[in-house]
Amino acid sequence: MRFYTQSRQYYCGIDLHTRWMYICILSQTGEIVYHKNHRVGEASFLTAIAPFREGLVVGVECTFTWYWLADLCAREGIEFVLGHALYMRAIHGAKVKNDRVDSHKIAALLRGGTFPMAYVYPREMRSTRDLLRRRTYFVRRRADLLAHIQNTNYQYNLPEFGRAISRKKNRGGIAEAFPETAVQESIRVDLELIDHLDVVIENLNALIERTARVHDPQALMLLRTIHGTGRILALVMLYEIHTIERFESVQQFCSYARLATSKHESAGKVSGRSRRKIGNQHLKWAFSEATALFLKDNPAGMKYKKRLEKKHGKAKAMAILSHRLGRAVYYMLKRGRAFDMQTFLAT
């Protein structure tokens, strides 16, 4: 975890909401020079900080409303710091908690060098990343609909479909196979939604891939060289990573991707592990999928996995393989080299 430790003349902490924002500004000596509630807006924010703008740093907790403020500070040349919400215990664990108190605590954390920093994703790629996440949501809803059709078929003990109903050509006559009219209508609605989602997802795929080639075609090409990694997984990795230069080490990258766990240790004894959900869940999903597809039609990879299973068991073997794949991606992007199967399996 990185903390903001730079010295500034003024420290501005904002408890930001959708309609209101409580602004607290501390001087270098810790004196409160401004502490008021404002309507959310660019003009009101700039007016409030105008007397203290020279040498000012602005800190905000990472909630869903920070985009506009980060973009405004970037345009105005004001330093902006995003706080990691899961590590700001001084705010969430307090006995007294309200907007006025929270804004003061954010400013105090900035001044004291204990403000936990999250990554401020740049505006140029942010909208495409969010669109890619939205696409994942639609894919999962489509999978839910397919699962509902399969489960309904099992409920009525009907013959298996025989072919994968995820393909449109294999979905003809499914609704009519059910005996009751209400059930037929339920399946028909599912099929109509699936057909619509097929069109939506395919259009999103084309749009996102065109945009990705403009943003970083070299990184996209390198990620596609991993065995089993297609365009969607490569796009998810590309946009969730953004740039590999923001990670100081491979350990930091693997921790961010939830491929490594942390230990609780005291007096030389390990008491357990925790914080498994701190990191990027989308990147974790991408590496889990990439690991499964890496083993498909890959005899050398399966042989290596079986060696790991004999030593660590099946579940841990997959976790180790995901971790190794994450390390490979880090060095691929860092060195600008394509994936080498022989090197990956030999090390």
Image (cartoon, grey):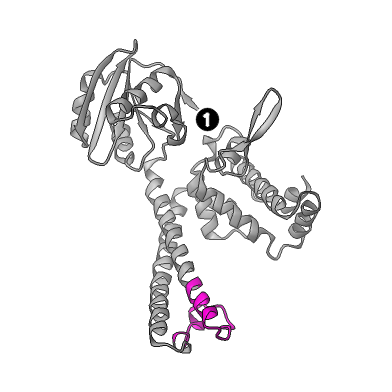
Tell me which residue sits at (40%, 60%) in the image: 207
| Mark 1, other Cα within 10 Å: few <14 / some 14–19 / many ≥20 | few
Residue 81 in which image quadrant = top left
Q: Position of residue 30 (x, y in %)?
A: 33, 13
Residue 131 in which image quadrant = bottom left
On whether residue 162 falls in the magenta region, the answer is yes
Tell me which residue sits at (43%, 30%) in the image: 88
296 sits to left or right of 17: right
| Magenta stretch bounds | 147-175
| Amino acid type, label 1 | Met
Q: Position of residue 286 (x, y in %)?
A: 55, 53
Residue at mark 1? 1
Depicted 150 relative to depicted 243: above or below: below
Q: Could one spot residue 201 in this view of the protein? A: yes
9 sits to left or right of 119: left
Q: Could one spot residue 166 in this view of the protein? A: no
Tell me which residue sits at (50%, 53%) in the image: 236
Q: Position of residue 316 (x, y in %)?
A: 70, 50
4 sits to left or right of 345: left
> Depth check: 2 or 189 in front?
189
Depicted 155 relative to depicted 23: above or below: below
Q: Secondary structure at mark 1?
A: loop
Q: Residue furthest top?
A: 29
